[in-house]
Amino acid sequence: MTEFDTLQTKELSVARNFTVAGRTGRPAYFEALVGAQMGGWFNAAKAQLTFGGAGQVSGMASAFNCEILLPNLTTSGGAHCALELNFNFTAATVLQANMDVPQAIICAKVGGHQTGIDAWEVLANAAAIQFSGLTGGNGKVFATGSNSASNATLKIMIGGTAHYIMLTTTPSTV
């Protein structure tokens, strides 16, 4: 395809059965080979969900959904995650040290009209990250309890070592 070729379709569905043990697979792959400096934004793939004038949803809406359906058996190994993010560097990679230009594994933005953002931010169910399905308890991913600094912790792994983000049910006024 040249730079200006397009593929238009009502719906694109990619499915492939993998039945040979030991294979690796990627039923859909998007790659953009960039040989020149691009403009203000550039993505290899984008998912966008746009609601029109009467558009709405009665359940969950998302622009992109990642799910992994685990087997009904005890696995013999391997890592499992619903979303894998890789931020890869070459030996010569040098990134800008500019606080106005994020260099991060995840960049999350809230955008649009400030009136709508302000109204959303004060909702009781508004959050930067929402987890469902975690049950609190001693030694769990979501560990509940109390000490002088927090009501609970959230377990994260850094380099194979468990670390805990301290949480409190009282918002900060700092």
Image (cartoon, helix red, strand yellow):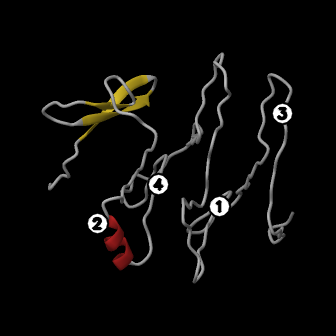
Where residue 107 is drawn, which disc sits there?
A: 4
Q: Residue at x 84, y 67 (%)?
A: 7
As drawn, which residue projects farthest toward the front?
A: 58
Q: Which residue is mark 3?
A: 18
As drawn, which residue projects farthest toward the top?
A: 76
In the rendered image, residue 74, in percent from the top left (x then y), is placed at 63, 18
Q: Quadrant of residue 166?
A: top left
Whether label 4 touches label 1, CB < 8 Å: no
Identify which amino acid the numbered label 4 is placed on.
Answer: Cys
In the rendered image, residue 153, in percent from the top left (x then y), is placed at 30, 34
Q: What element does badge 3 sit on?
A: loop
In the rendered image, residue 52, in percent from the top left (x then y), is placed at 60, 80
Q: Quadrant of residue 157?
A: top left
Q: Nearer the viewer, mark 3 or mark 4?
A: 3
Q: Residue at x 62, y 66 (%)?
A: 48
Query: From mark 2 to mark 4, how far is it between C-alphas?
Result: 22 Å
Whether label 3 touches label 4, CB < 8 Å: no
Q: Which residue is mark 1?
A: 46
Q: What element does badge 4 sit on?
A: loop
Whether label 2 touches label 4, CB < 8 Å: no
Q: Which of disc 4 and disc 2 is earlier in sequence?
A: 4
Tell me: 148 left or right of 13.
left
Query: From mark 4 to mark 1, how far is it between C-alphas?
Result: 14 Å
Q: Nearer the viewer, mark 1 or mark 2?
A: 2
Query: From mark 1 to mark 2, how far is it between C-alphas?
Result: 29 Å
Q: Which residue is mark 2?
A: 122
Q: Which of disc 3 and disc 2 is earlier in sequence?
A: 3
Q: Which of disc 4 and disc 3 is earlier in sequence?
A: 3
Identify which amino acid the numbered label 3 is placed on.
Answer: Phe
Q: Which of disc 1 and disc 4 is earlier in sequence?
A: 1
